[in-house]
Image: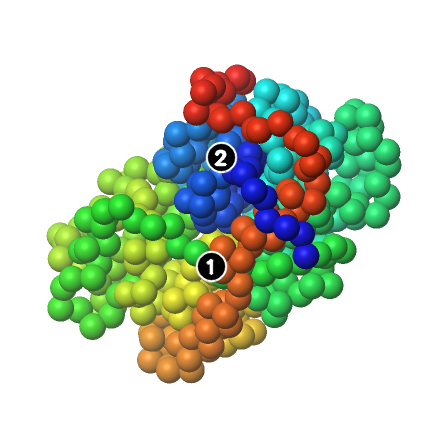
């Protein structure tokens, strides 16, 4: 086993887009700072980055499809052909831009190791170009590797542009270590070609309770329901929010709805019949403040939402809108922890009936709690940090100069 470092490390963290790719990195990054390491965080210039709590940020100017106002139109997709847009979304200009920006960061701020999201192909390439170990943190909770075949050619082109040798087996995608914030029943070790370490879900510490979370815990209602469509697919959900509100409004429950960025909560204010005493609509509330009090979560099947609910032992109704959400919904349904209606066609009455069935059937809650127990048995973020320290120590020259403290540098604001 490698000897831990005898001085603070410079650890660069990179994510390609959106909260769903940043969230799995945050517990590791915050723990790194807490134990005295220096960190830099580079990612899309969006509210999600500024709200991350880090003062040393490298915002990247990239256009995200989610950065449009309103719920838009629901995009139809083939549930049997999910994850077919990895090349379109994460390679091309997105990966080449990350290659340039992350390479510049690693050059200006000599780093010991890079930690990035599993779809941050440009960052992985920049780390290899710089001769740094790379730790890959998975963003998808359950999705298989069916998407990898579709990126073989563009990955080789990206590597060629960086002056790297071909990688026909795509070993770069596993990094020196793959960190998986999910159980082996969700994503087995066989999905990866290198060393794998699991990570227990680690909710971000809340400095002060959100008023909506306090409201959610209060009241006389016997049931608590949390409704969310995440932070990216919310802008392509069409009329789904309206159907969900109509479905749950008839239930004897206290209901909190979060619309996510770019969607105005006032669009879905409950009418007089279901006043503020029973339904509240907010743009964002940290889900960690809500899950332990919820009896049912209604969501789109995003990995962070699904793992967060299961970690707290809360059953779900999953209505996938794309990406990894169908595999997540399939897992939840097969495990007996929820149900997966069709987001495009399910009526409010049908969704309400599913909610009533789950709430009145104890086995759903029991199944969710069993998975939650498995998640809580995984290695802690401290154990993962020890592994990262060991990788960095093994790769660092014995007489390396002390790292540059990013406190002495101006925040990187390049495009």
Q: Is residue 7 above or below residue 289?
A: above
Pinpoint residue 52: horizontal percent, then vertical percent.
Answer: 40, 38
Q: Is residue 2 above or below residue 370?
A: above
The CA span between labels 1 and 2 is 23 Å
Q: Which residue is mark 1?
A: 201
Q: Is residue 257 above or below residue 361?
A: above
Query: What is the number of the mark on residue 78?
Result: none
Residue at 75%, 48% in the rendered image: 148
Pinpoint residue 182: horizontal percent, then vertical percent.
Answer: 55, 61
Is disc 2 placed on a helix, strand or loop? strand
Q: Which residue is mark 2?
A: 38
Pinpoint residue 399: horizontal percent, then vertical percent.
Answer: 68, 32
Instruction: Name the residue nearer the viewer: 283 or 218.
Output: 218
> Position of 188 compared to 281: left or right?
right
Q: Nearer the viewer, mark 1 or mark 2?
A: 2
Q: Is residue 184 visible?
A: yes
Instruction: Name the residue nearer the viewer: 261 or 17.
Output: 17
Find residue 108 and report its image quarter: top right
Residue at 15%, 53% in the rendered image: 276
Residue at 37%, 43% in the rendered image: 260
């Amino acid at each position: 086993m490698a000897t831990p470092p005898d001085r603070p490390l410079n650890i660069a963290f990179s994510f390609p887009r959106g909260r769903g790719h940043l969230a799995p990195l945050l517990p590791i990054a915050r723990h790194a700072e807490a134990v005295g390491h220096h960190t830099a965080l580079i990612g899309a210039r969006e509210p999600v980055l500024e709200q991350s709590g880090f003062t040393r940020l490298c915002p990247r100017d990239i256009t995200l499809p989610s950065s449009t106002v309103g719920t838009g139109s629901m995009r139809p997709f083939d549930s049997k052909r999910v994850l077919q847009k990895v090349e379109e979304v994460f390679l091309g200009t997105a990966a080449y831009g990350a290659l340039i920006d992350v390479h510049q960061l690693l050059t200006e701020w000599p780093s010991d190791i890079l930690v990035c999201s599993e779809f941050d192909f440009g960052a992985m390439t920049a780390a290899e170009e710089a001769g740094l170990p790379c730790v890959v943190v998975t963003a998808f909770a359950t999705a298989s590797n069916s998407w990898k075949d579709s990126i073989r050619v563009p990955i080789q082109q990206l590597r060629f542009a960086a002056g790297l040798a071909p990688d026909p087996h795509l070993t770069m995608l596993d990094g020196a270590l793959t960190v998986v914030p999910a159980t082996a029943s969700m994503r087995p070790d066989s999905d990866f070609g290198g060393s794998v370490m699991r990570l227990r879900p680690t909710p971000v510490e809340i400095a002060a309770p959100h008023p909506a979370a306090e409201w959610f815990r209060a009241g006389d209602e016997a049931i608590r329901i949390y409704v969310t469509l995440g932070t990216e697919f919310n802008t392509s959900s069409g009329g789904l929010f309206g159907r969900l509100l109509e479905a749950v409004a008839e239930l004897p429950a206290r209901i909190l709805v979060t619309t996510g960025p770019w969607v105005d909560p006032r669009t879905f204010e409950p009418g007089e019949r279901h006043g503020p005493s029973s339904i509240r609509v907010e743009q964002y509330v940290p889900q960690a403040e809500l899950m332990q009090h919820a009896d049912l979560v209604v969501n789109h099947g995003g990995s962070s939402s699904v793992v967060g609910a299961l970690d707290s032992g809360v059953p779900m109704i999953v209505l996938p809108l794309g990406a990894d959400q169908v595999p997540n919904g399939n897992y939840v349904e097969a495990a007996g922890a929820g149900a997966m209606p069709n987001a495009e066609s399910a009526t409010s009455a049908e969704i309400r009936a599913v909610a009533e069935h789950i709430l009145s059937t104890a086995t759903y809650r029991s199944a969710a709690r069993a998975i939650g127990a498995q998640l809580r048995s995984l290695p802690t973020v401290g154990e993962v940090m020890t592994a990262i320290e060991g990788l960095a120590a093994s790769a660092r020259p014995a007489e390396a100069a002390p790292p540059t403290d990013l406190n002495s540098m101006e925040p990187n604001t390049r495009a």
